[in-house]
Image (cartoon, helix red, strand yellow):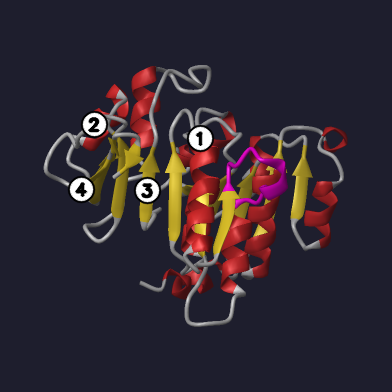
């Protein structure tokens, strides 16, 4: 499916981007490029945000800093795109929900503005290592890969929206694979986000100051698989109880276990360690 065919649906629409961090600025600039009328809103005063906001302003974004709910959601707002740093329970996002304004995460936006395949990696631990390793494997196989998302390595920091726009500028029969590290925060407002390959490393208690419970955290992580279909791949860690429970829940994609055990847990596709060798 050529998802980028839907890019034109943003042209002329009044969109508020909430959160003026790197993800928000990247999303705002991309939307302006696509013809949207964009407000970038953040409750933090501009003096505390640094010079990057000025880059968005020069791109034609209406930047509103130190903004409250009404300034963030001006009359006529048709869509909200939220940065991962903005909690789902924040006043501005809850106001958008109450007003029946659709809310999308920035990774959902990225998915909708590119036809490039996405390999997405989530989990509590091992995300960056797995993301970078996967990109290296693709590169060694002759497939161009762009590392992006919530990657903690400073030398490869690039949002998924930025990578999506870069991929759309590529000329040739094949788009690069966007290899994205995805946090639970980025999965809170996904709808159609459908990685060609989705990987869940493990889940242990984390970010419980943001998520109301560990169960909510697990449920949010599982959303990486929700929109997949039988042609997509769901790679799941078997050795961790929480990730295993997701893998056993009847995923829509083709499940592949990985385990450090000496044998696969069932007769389905699996990667395991046999006498110190990955099989």
- Classify mark 1: helix, strand or loop: helix
Residue 32, percent from left and from top: 67, 64
**Vertical order, 179 against 34 (above or below):** above
The residue nearer to you, when weighing 169 against 266, is: 266
**Residue 136 lies in the magenta stretch:** no
Residue at x 87% of width, y 45% of height: 51
Residue at x 48% of width, y 56% of height: 137
Q: Quadrant of the C terminus?
A: top left
Q: Nearer the viewer, mark 1 or mark 4?
A: 4
Q: CA distance from mark 2 to mark 3?
A: 24 Å
Residue at x 58% of width, y 59% of height: 146
Q: Nearer the viewer, mark 2 or mark 1?
A: 2
Quarter residue 93 falls in: top right
Q: CA distance from mark 2 to mark 1?
A: 34 Å
Q: CA distance from mark 1 to mark 4?
A: 30 Å
- The first of marks 4 and 2 along the sequence is 2
Q: Quadrant of the N terminus?
A: bottom left
- The residue lying furthest to the bottom in this view is 172
- Classify mark 2: helix, strand or loop: loop
- The first of marks 3 and 4 along the sequence is 3
Residue denoted by label 3 = 198
- Classify mark 4: helix, strand or loop: loop
Q: CA distance from mark 4 to mark 2?
A: 15 Å
Which region shows up in magenta? 149-159
Residue 43, percent from left and from top: 72, 33
Position of residue 59 in the picture relative to residue 94 (left or right): right
**Residue 153 lies in the magenta stretch:** yes
- The first of marks 3 and 1 along the sequence is 1
Residue denoted by label 2 = 262
């Amino acid at each position: 499916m050529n998802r980028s065919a839907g890019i034109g649906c943003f042209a002329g629409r009044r969109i508020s981007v909430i959160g003026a961090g790197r993800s928000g600025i990247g999303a705002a600039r991309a939307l302006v490029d696509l013809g949207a009328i964009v407000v970038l809103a953040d409750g933090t005063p501009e003096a505390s945000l640094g010079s990057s906001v000025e880059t968005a302003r020069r791109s034609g974004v209406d930047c509103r800093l130190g903004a409250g709910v009404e300034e963030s959601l001006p009359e006529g707002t048709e869509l909200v795109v939220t940065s991962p740093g903005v909690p789902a329970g924040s006043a501005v996002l809850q106001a958008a929900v109450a007003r029946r304004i659709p809310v999308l995460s920035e990774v959902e936006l990225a998915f909708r503005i590119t036809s490039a395949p996405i390999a997405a990696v989530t989990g509590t631990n091992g995300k960056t290592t797995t993301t970078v390793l996967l990109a290296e494997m693709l590169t060694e196989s002759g497939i161009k890969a762009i590392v992006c998302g919530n990657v903690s390595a400073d030398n490869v920091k690039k949002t998924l929206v930025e990578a999506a726009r870069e991929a759309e500028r590529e000329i040739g029969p094949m788009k690069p694979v966007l290899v994205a590290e995805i946090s639970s925060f980025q999965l809170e407002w996904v709808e159609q986000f459908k990685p060609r390959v989705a990987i869940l490393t493990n889940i242990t208690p984390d970010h419980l100051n943001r998520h109301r419970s560990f169960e909510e955290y697990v449920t949010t992580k599982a959303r990486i698989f929700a929109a997949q279909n039988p042609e997509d791949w769901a790679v799941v860690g078997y050795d961790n109880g929480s990730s295993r429970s997701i893998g056993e829940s009847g995923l829509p994609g083709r499940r592949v276990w990985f385990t450090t055990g000496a044998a696969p847990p069932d007769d389905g596709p699996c990667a395991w360690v046999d006498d110190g060798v990955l099989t």
